[in-house]
Image: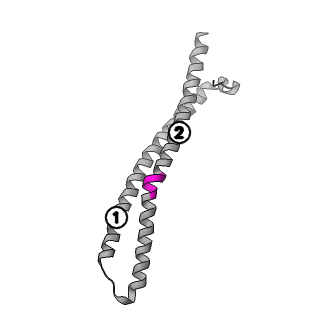
Amino acid sequence: MFQVSEDAAVNKAEYMNALQESGAVCNAALARLKQDKQFYWLYSAALFLTLVCMIGSEMPFSYFKTYNIIRIIVTIMLCYTIFMAGIWNRMEVNAVLTGKLGIEVVHANLADSNSHNSYS
């Protein structure tokens, strides 16, 4: 199972405090990731509406190449924002949750070793 190092046994209070602060940082990161996901979906919707409006309208022949380049750029940006809102955000959330779970496990093990030492 998990063995607490000698250094951790000496400085348990400091480690416990640091782990609690780390958990708070993880919670703040999760809140920020939720906000980022909402913004990416909002940007995706705005870019999609822009692209739909651009498809329905026609530009004069002299601006045809520029207009097509702008449509390509908007399409690429739309794909990027959908990727960031969907796949990448989920990966980041899972990474933070994994770190938070690890912090909670270490915190619980230190708390258990504190309770065993106080009864001995």
Tell me: residue 32, above or below residue 119: below
Kind of element beneath mark 1: helix
**Circle 1: residue type:** Ala
Residue 87 inside the magenta-drawn segment:
yes
* N-terminal label among 1 and 2: 1
Return the residue found at the far bottom.
62
Tell me: residue 91, above or below residue 10: below
Q: Which mark is residue 46?
A: 1
Return the residue found at the far right.
6
Circles 1 and 2 in contact, beta carbons < 8 Å: no
The residue at 46%/40% (across/down) is 27
Q: Position of residue 112 (x, y in %)?
A: 56, 20
Kind of element beneath mark 2: helix
Q: Quadrant of residue 116?
A: top right
**Magenta span of residues:** 83-88
Q: Position of residue 31 (x, y in %)?
A: 42, 44
Q: Which mark is residue 71?
A: none
Q: Position of residue 110 (x, y in %)?
A: 59, 24
The residue at 58%/10% (across/down) is 119
User: Label 1: how many residues lie within 10 Å, few (<14), some (14-19) or many (20+)?
Assistant: few
Residue at mark 2:
98
> What distance separates the C-alpha of mark 1 from that of mark 2?
33 Å
The residue at 69%/27% (across/down) is 7
Which residue occupies the foreground of this view, 16 or 73?
73
Name the image quarter holding the C terminus.
top right
Tell me: residue 119, above or below residue 73: above
**Circle 2: residue type:** Thr
Magenta residues: mostly which secondary structure?
helix
